[in-house]
Structure formats: structure tokens, C-alpha cells
Image (cartoon, grey):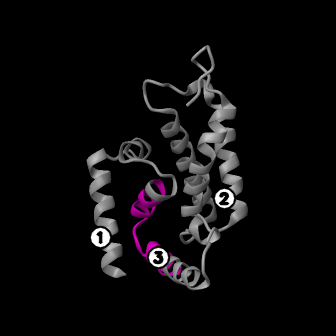
Amino acid sequence: MMWRSSATEPDWNAVFTEQLPRVYNYFCYRLDNEADIQELTSRTFEKAWRARHRYRRELAGFATWLLRIAHNVVIDHLRLAREYAPLEELEERRAEGVPEAEHERASDVARLRDLIPTLPMREQELLALKYGAGANNREIASVTGLSESNVGTILHRTVQLLRDRW
């Protein structure tokens, strides 16, 4: 994270460049509508900008603080929509290679999309933070209010459950 010389305000160009893919991917794991994904990504950065004076370095890293904002934005969105969209796999959009490999990947993504919604919302959220946003267990714990060890245990059990159902 690049901080300006005053060390109280981050370099917002650097923040946007560094954190945009992470926040965008988080929303890709939670939503299936590209317009919503883009809107919520934009809303997250707007909220962060407006709340920048409330950020406290001693409480959480900047990336964790930004993911917490994204987490709250998607919860508000889902609450208003009153439905949960299936997993949207970013890799599906970027599928490259031979047609057979693309077909196999698409098939695997479709299978995973069918399995993810059968999980409780908490597990869906943890998967989105871990694999969509690329957050580590400590960051996820900070965002969700769970302990770091609890996050690890739940993720391990959830991945094992998905493997068993595969």
C-alpha cells in the first residue's frame, strides 16, 4: 500500500490499481450479474473514499478495511434483492486454450455453481472472501468477526464437503 508523505492518507491511485481486482473478484464470487458486480465494486471504492477519515491503521490493514466495506455493500445488496445469486466464476470468463479444456472447465464451473448455493450463507461468504477476494484467514476473520482458527476450520470443512459432493 502506498501512503502519501503525510502517512495519514493512502495514495488512492495506488489503492485503486492494487485493490480493484481483489474487490471485483470478491463480487464475482457472490453475484452473477456483471452490471451489479461493476456497480458494487464502484460503490465500495466510493464508500471507502467517503469514509477515509475513519480508517484506523492500528485496527486493520487497509486491504482488510476495504474488504469489510465490500462485505457490507454486498450484504446490503443481497438484502434488498432478497435472493442469492449463484457463484460466478471469473475463470469462466477468461477461459483460454483448446476447446476440450474450455468445455471441461465450463463443466466444472457449472458443477461448482450448482454446489455452492446448497451451502449455508456463512460458508458461501467465506468461500467468496477466500477464493474470490484472495483474502487470508486473518483478513477474513477481521471482516466476518469469526476467529482466525474458526475461519480455517470452516473453510477446510466446506472444501472437504464440496469434494465429497463432487
Query: Three-letter amino acid code at disc 2?
Result: Ile
Vertical order, 10 against 88 (above or below): above
Q: Residue at x 70, y 56 (%)?
A: 38
Q: How many marks?
A: 3
First of labels 3, 2 by sequence position: 2
Residue 83 appears anywhere in the view: no
- Whole-percent x and y of residue 82? 59, 66
Q: Residue at x 69, y 33 (%)?
A: 13
- Magenta portion: prevailing SS class: helix
Q: Which structural element holds mark 2? A: helix
- Crowding around mark 3 (Cα neighbors within 10 Å: few <14, some 14 to 19, many 20+) is some
Question: Residue 112 got which mark?
Answer: 3
First of labels 3, 1 by sequence position: 3
Q: Magenta includes 12? A: no
For label 2, the residue is 37
Q: Residue furthest front?
A: 98
Residue 112 appears anywhere in the view: yes
In the picture, the quarter occupied by the N terminus is: top right
Left or right placement of residue 149 versus residue 33 in this view: left
Vertical order, 46 against 8 (above or below): below
Q: Residue at x 47, y 76 (%)?
A: 112
- Whole-percent x and y of residue 89? 56, 68
Q: Residue at x 66, y 50 (%)?
A: 41
Chain part drawn in magenta: 110-129
For label 1, the residue is 160
Q: Which structural element holds mark 1? A: helix
Left or right placement of residue 105 versus residue 122 in this view: right
Instruction: Give the Cα distance between marks 3 and 2.
Output: 19 Å
Instruction: Give the Cα distance between marks 2 and 1.
Output: 28 Å
